[in-house]
Amino acid sequence: MAVRILRRAAQMLFVVWGAATLTFFVLRLAAGDPARLVNPPGTPEEIVTQVRHRLGTDQPLLVQYKDFLVDLLHGDLGRSFHGEQSVRDAVFAALPNTLELAGVTMVIASLLALALGILAALYANRLVDRVVLVYVALAQSTPNFWFAVVLVLVFAIQHPWLPAIDKTGPESFVLPVTTLVVMLTPVLIRTVRQSFLETLGEDHVRAARARGLPERRVLLVHGLKVAALPLVTLIGLQAGFVLAGSYVVEFVFNWPGIGKLTLDAVNSRNFPMIQGGVLVAASGFVLVNFVVDVAYSFLDPRIRRGAR
Amino acid sequence: MELDHWEEELLEVAERKLERGEITRREFVRLLGVLGIAAAVPGALAGRAKAAEAAQAGSVRFLIAENFWANWEPYQNTAQSQFRINEQIYDHLVEFPTGNIGAPRPALATSWRRVDGRTWEFKLRSGVRFHNGQDFTANDVKASIELASGATKKKTVDAGLFWVPTTVKIVDDNTVRLTTKQPFGALFSALQHSHIVSAADLEGPAAALKKKPNGTGAFKLVKDEPTKKTMTRNDEYWRRPAQIAQLVWEYVQDPQTRLNALLAGQAHAIDRVPPEHLPIISRSSKLALASRTGIEMVNLWVRPGRSTLWAQNAAYRRAVNWSIDRDALVRNLVKGRSRAAQSVIPSGTLYWRAQSPKYTYNPARAKAELANGNLADGGPEFELWVAKGFLPRAVEVVEVIVDNMRKVGLKPKVRTADVAGVIDDIFSKKGTGLMYHLSWSSNGDPMTAFQVYSPAFAWYFGDKTIANLLDAGMRATNPAKRQQTYARLQAHMWKQVWHVPLYYSDFTVGHSKSLKGLRVTQNFSTNFYPARLA
């Protein structure tokens, strides 16, 4: 087991390094000279050269990459091209906001998916199931940027019950979390429903019923324990989608998280800030998957045995 | 005398007891006497009254559309957003409250006079202090102007764009003389751009200068976050202190998010309202629009060196100009206070003059010009680049232009990219575009408006007449001579049409009606002094 965890940890570091390297080179090879973007188009070359020197983008690419890696090993993510603030400080100030948003979303989405998925499985092909599946279809086909704006128009502007933007308090979570939950739940509900349907037909559930166990115990203990396994995997995978989805949601709701920080930086080719944002998001994604992998090993004895 | 933390707490407890009637006023005073803080109470209460007043004055939040802030190092960047925020923090020798660059008003200088063709004398205001409490002196003017103008060894961006080297002689504590290296007609325009910084700060470490602006302006920076700048009122301001206690400038990229915040009452003002949002704000009983025709020229900029046909065939250039329905673009797409171009500089520029002919949509004339230029087939295919998400409705504008052009036989091919991609193509040796839909803004002085067409910039076609007239305009100090020179320049450039003038931008700020006295000018200045919250 320890070997397996160590191997996964090494893979995790490799993926993070790969993401950082890819981001570094893609940014510099894609169109957009940051030195030109801080000046109006057509600014004399001499001025642009001065700015390029100040930003360090006049160095050969490999020199810039070496400096980036050395700084990274020292925990230094560089300084923003705009304002020269520490990227590490900015990223770590934004990170808790994104994690809070993602965390609340994951919890609510998981509970909702479990409830609706089980309900749909128990009443398969009946009205409740159909209503749940209609919700799934609608939620899956609703673009989150559109849904977010509609929520704001209805619940913040038409009826000023909730804040339209910013993270101001518990009430400010409602609209962004709703947007993310609606984006996330369809696939979770489908998985729980399917998994539960399969589990309900298995021998151990039939045996539990035959032993005369109460139906609630059959469902919530014997059924759920097995049916929830795919959900754990899926939550790990979805964590990445929540991070990606939160980019759009943070943008629309002006949520001071990693997504907004990165998108703001993209527009002005603020390389260090984009790298910092992507690096942290990639690390978060990899870390969640790592935790899920480890948790899965504990939850499923077959994997533990396989690991031996 | 200031109260300690525990004394503050005791005072609060005593105040609460007095309010609830648990103690009498006499007991209150006696209690304070026993505690030994009676002497400090008037000051403390005054401080609280000040805080209460500040709370009443309130905090104003302005959501801005640009995030090209660099750092606070003076005179080292050209970003419009930086200039706009600097205006809240710093003062200049003179100011232009209406945006009219021909009408300077006293600011840190109370009066001025011309001494000779290259020298101006300025009388300085006394009793002015920087945010750090230091007095404003003639030394600060000398250090600031000489650095900004390039009269010192250090290179600055301002020097290259706005100035000729200018030395400052201190006549006495309240008088300075500015001498320009050559006759310089745009001195007041340069003074409008370059704010006054403390000489001590300029002599100190550069790192400190980059991090902490220290001006004499109405607001001082108290918190600097990547996309958010929080300022508080400068209570020692040499004019009456601002009526707003706190001013927050925050970059919010998405116009819809800015609008949502304004509609929901979470922002007091929003920047650069796009055309589709104008009717929404107009309909609201709680919101208002401050609209100006911006001093911003939107052109199809033509990259020299990419087409010999364009460089050599004036009929081809005229044909392109007769093929575009500018009025329809302004009326149906850009909207607001935008205006179809009638000169190569924006209408708010000093000495602007409407040129003739007015280029309207005239397909017959465009075809005739093509035939004149032996291009009856419309000439070769060319790339027209447009930046997404930069100028309002840019992609739609270019689609209409392309449609117009194709109707007369021209062969444009649209390339869409983000602004970084467009700029890369302009400057790359492998760039393939011929025309670019972009803008150039200035402070309203003809020198800065025309500058973009000068040999120092990428858009210069080698037209010596332009270079000579630009030089003559810069050296002309007599207003009549300046006007005459820039009139000739406009006429010449309108005839040559090296680039394709389209329209002057709309500049609209949306704001809550509770925000009174917001000063929005045509040169994109958005000044929150002396605005107030009603």
Image (cartoon, coloured by chain):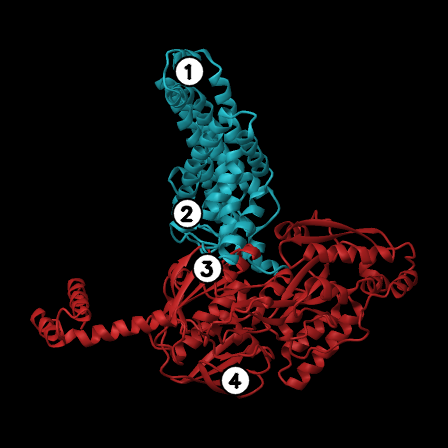
Q: Colour of chain A?
A: cyan
Badge 1 vs badge 2, beta-carbon distance below 8 Å = no
Q: Chain of mark 2?
A: A
Which numbered tag is attached to residue B120? 4
Side of B292 where B527 appears, left or right = left
Q: Which residue is mark 2?
A: A94
**Visible in this render: residue A273?**
no
For the residue pair A258 and A125, the one nearer the viewer reads as: A125
Q: Chain of mark 4?
A: B
CA distance for labels 3 and 4: 31 Å
For the residue pair B321 and A50, the one nearer the viewer reads as: B321
Q: How would you rate the neighbour count of disc 4 (Cα within 10 Å): few for under 14, some for 14-19, many for 20 or more?
A: some
Q: Chain of mark 1?
A: A
Compared with residue A258, is residue B437 higher up or lower down, i.e. above or below? Answer: below
Mark found first going from the N terminus, 3 or 4: 3
CA distance for labels 3 and 1: 54 Å
